[in-house]
Image (cartoon, rainbow, N blue to C red):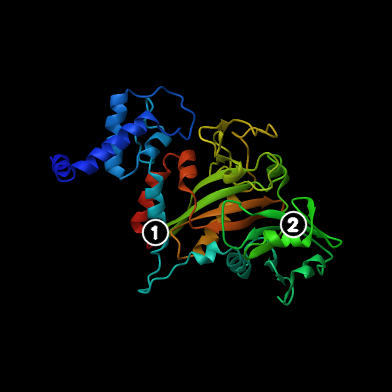
Amino acid sequence: MASLRGFLRHPVGYGLELVRTLRLLADPPAPDLPARAPRKPRRQQFRELLTWKMTHGDSGEDFFRHGLHLEGSEPAAGFMPVFQFMAQRDRANGRMSSAPEAFDYAALVGDKFLFGLFGRALGFPVPRPLALLGPDQVTRLDGEAEVQPLEELLTPPSGSVDGFCKPVVGGKGRSVFPLEVRNGELRVAGESVGLDAFRATLSGHFLLEERVQQHPVMARLHPPSVNTLRLVTVRSSGRIEAFSAILRTGAGGCRVDNLALGGWAAPVDLVSGTVSGQAHSRNEGLVASHHPDTGIAFEGFQVPMMGDVVALVVRMHRFLYGFHSLGWDVALTPEGPVVIEANDQWGGRTMMLMDPTLGGRFRASLADREG
């Protein structure tokens, strides 16, 4: 009856929504996982899609991306439209402060330089910062922090530099590259470049960090990239707990492991550190049982020092009390885990793809987010 009254009040809007639904049924987006079952009858899809749209206020694309249009699929509690997850995640992270004044903690993790200062001040293992770079200047961080012309980068006090350069603000691995300085020569991703060409790549502030030497077990997956764990922690009922984890690895010789740049991700058991399923790429519906470059099997791969990783990020989250949830990027070295960065806007689509229960568990964790 309520739907009928709504239609009578807004017949044009309801009519347009009906047309959009029919178009979506005719040309749906591909599911995030390969379709292993036939589609439900068209009428059933139409009926369930309308229910999904009314329940979630969603455009309907996630109905198909979750594979809910396929036989045998049901809208489990973990299925959650991405826009809805993002809104709840950001709202929770923005309302942790008990002070009456609005305060946004996001800069503490959004700025990689500030996050590194936070980690080092408390003695946590984070990459050693070497310099801040701009188009015209370098500020060395291993001495007096004196601002110098960019040309001074060619004569480092130690005689050489072996590091990674990344924008101070930004994500998804974009504009991240290895940087070496030896005998007055700049090498970006292994190739020699002139100072002017290098200057042109520095649009804004960049942080130069010491290169992380990864654990040989992790290097087996894809040696050119530092292959990391993305581990999510959540603050709920006054406790910090490890929530979900995936293994990320580069591919095709890429120096970074981000999915946005062609990498692969696979689910990891939080207790044992064992990869518990196939890996997925950012390409829709593409999965692999083995790494396409090295042939290493994903399922059953044992991530070293998983217990140390979990304990480390839980301890760090306690000091970042302004956040309900954080996604940590952690590299493994022979000496132990190193936290590359923390993300308040950690991606929900990939994590829910790996763990269908995540959406429901995340909603439940919001019940006591002030704890």
Residue 324 falls in which quadrant of the image?
bottom left
Callout 1: SS: helix
* Mark 2: amino acid: Leu
* Mark 1: amino acid: Ala
Looking at the image, residue 97 sits to the left or right of residue 255; the answer is left
Callout 2: SS: strand
Quadrant (top left/top right/bottom left/bottom right) for the C terminus: bottom left
Q: Which residue is drawn at 59% across and 48% down?
A: 229
Residue 26 position, x and y percent, is 36, 29
Q: How far apart are marks 1 and 2 (CA)?
A: 37 Å
Question: Residue 123 versus residue 160: which sits nearer the camera?
Answer: 160
Residue 63 seen anywhere in this rendered image of the structure? yes
Q: Earlier in the sequence, mark 1 or mark 2?
A: 1
Q: In this view, does 47 lie above or below 185?
A: above
Residue 353 position, x and y percent, is 47, 39
Looking at the image, residue 328 sits to the left or right of residue 68; the answer is right
Looking at the image, residue 361 sits to the left or right of residue 264; the answer is left
Q: Which mark is residue 232?
A: none
Residue 129 falls in which quadrant of the image?
bottom right
Residue 44 position, x and y percent, is 29, 26
Q: Residue 179 carries which label?
A: 2
Q: Which mark is residue 92?
A: 1
Quadrant (top left/top right/bottom left/bottom right) for the N terminus: top left
